[in-house]
Amino acid sequence: MRLRFLTTASKQLRLSSQQRHRLLATSTSGQQQREEGGSGSQYSRALYAAATVGGIGAGYWLFNELDRKRRQPVELEQPKKETPTAATLDAEDEARLWHKTKRTDLPTYSVEDVLQHNKPENGIWVTYGLGVYDVTQFAPNHPGGDKILMAAGNAIDPFWAIYQQHNTLEVLQLLESFRIGNLNKVEAVESDELGSPWAQEPKRHELLKPASKRPFNAEPPISMLGEHFYTPNELFYVRNHLPVPCLKAEDYELELEVEAGAGKPKCTFNLDEIKKLPKHTVTAAIMCGGNRRSEMTRIKTVKGLSWGAGAVGNAKWSGARLCDVLRAQGVEPDERLQVIFEGADLDPTAHPFGASIPLAKALDPRGDVVLAYEMNDQPLTRDHGYPIRVIVPGTVGARNVKWLTRIVVADHESDSHWQQNDYKGFSPSTDWDTVDFSKAQAIQAMPVTSAICSPMPEERVKVDKGHITVYGYAWSGGGRRIERVDLTNDGGKSWHVAKLEQENVPDGRHYGWSLWTVRLPVTEEQQTKSELEIWAKAVDSAYNVQPETFENIWNLRGVLANAYHKVKVKLI
């Protein structure tokens, strides 16, 4: 089947002169890159470049030439499952087939090739169906350029499934003008075989951006993160250290053992018994200790997953209170003791993921530690700990053990790697030759932090009546309420206080995050400049405040990364 790249000249002329001018301006530089990087004959590349310019309204004189050349269309491979023919399709239906059709005049790229082009300095490539598109020059000028940057190096399909306004002839024509190749859709043969620990990983939402695939760790697009006070379950960041276990509700058992202090030595609960206990709900943000590590590593390399600012989420967690369970077994307060949690996820030596918290936190009704079986009024998903996850509000994410199978009251901390040799902070002068993990305290409560969710870095932002809108999140560990979020766009000469959205709960139990919004004034002088840098800092109820830079809080594991969040944008 032959498909034309362009409609007839008369249909193209439906675009207004303003639209033609805008589309031409945003495609010229992208066209030049395609000419340099494409494959095929010189004639084909020249023809395609001319067609692209004409297709987006280059000028009336070009349409006559295009109409002549249109009689010599580029041959496209027939999609195996497409039944309509070009003769039966109108222009818009035809345009919707472009991204499903392999272009024989363009090269083929692998997923790995596309992934390498995920930021402006490397070029911004995206995929849509079978098409690979270079949108480096277009993205900064597009009103929704922030959404494009979210998909940089990946597929835009899931975004366009949400933003249906892209499904028009004009937009599809523009997208095709940026096409540089075809995506190799042949999936790599998985090594998963029967019995492999990775064979039954759950399906994840396409918008989650992986920091690693095995184990699976991923964060959502940050601008979408700031749109919901309660993070949608499917967009909640995923932090796994080991393969996700497969647990059945009817087989589930939770063992409680008291090795030290008062209480019955051992007992076991099934899921129904836990659900029969009084149900308690707490709003709590969960944040990975390595959230924003990618910013810290710009100062000096650290070891760990390169998280952005999206390794955090806020949810309602419901289940039985741990203090009720412990007290029912006769456990009494003792500040010397620890509560150890073990999950069903096992390492190759059959040791489970483990963590521990002070017994004082576990027994405190105001500590709100919950054996959660619901997340935002829905049963836990496998990635988030089904059927039971312990929620320890106000603490680093690693203490909120998923797939909980064992609780131990002991006179020592968990001996797991993640309690003893990870998630600890050190001096900026400590390196891997001098570090001694035994001399540092395990992270429990997290420090105050904030992040700008919108606008995104390098986004083009429209100034509206001398202001731009900025929004984001803020959170502090230990139940400390966010007191204030301050923003500046002049290097700290003037500060502006954001409006907060947060729960009305007592300080000390303020475990959920706060969302904030501000209309940030932009001076006339600033509007004449091409770039503006926005800084955000949060202050909590103890008047703890974020440090200005990462230099003096750098640490070899890249944890506790809570310096001012800084975003550079372009004004329009």
Image: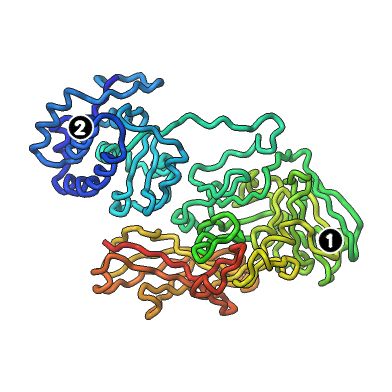
Between residues 457 and 248, which one lies in front from this camera angle?
A: 457
In three-dimensional space, the C-alpha distance between marks 2 and 1, rounded to whole angstroms, equals 74 Å
In the image, what residue occupies the spot 89% across and 63% down?
260
Residue at the far front in the pictured view: 433
Residue 47: which numbered mark, if any? 2
Residue 71's place in the image compared with 119, above or below, is above
What residue is drawn where x is 32% and y is 46%?
A: 135
Which label was assigned to residue 409? Answer: 1
Q: Residues within 10 Å of mark 2 (few under 14, many from 20)?
A: some
Residue 279 shows in this picture:
no
Residue 475 visible in image: yes
For the residue marked with disc 2, what is the amino acid? Leu
423 to 253, vertically: above or below:
below
- Looking at the rendered structure, the kind of residue marked 1 is Val
Left or right: 325 with respect to 79? right
Question: Mark 1: few, some, or many residues within 10 Å (few <14, many ≥20)?
Answer: many
Closer to the observer: label 2 or label 1? 2
Residue 241, position as x, y percentages in the image:
66, 50
Q: Quadrant of the C terminus?
A: bottom left
**Foreground: 397 or 28?**
28
Looking at this rendering, what residue extends furthest in the left direction?
61
Residue 512 placement: quadrant: bottom right
x then y, percent, for residue 194: 69, 29
Q: Earlier in the sequence, mark 2 or mark 1?
A: 2
Percent coordinates x, y for residue 562 in the rendering: 54, 68
Q: Position of residue 25 (x, y in %)?
A: 20, 49
For the residues bearing labels 2 and 1, Cβ distance under 8 angstroms:
no
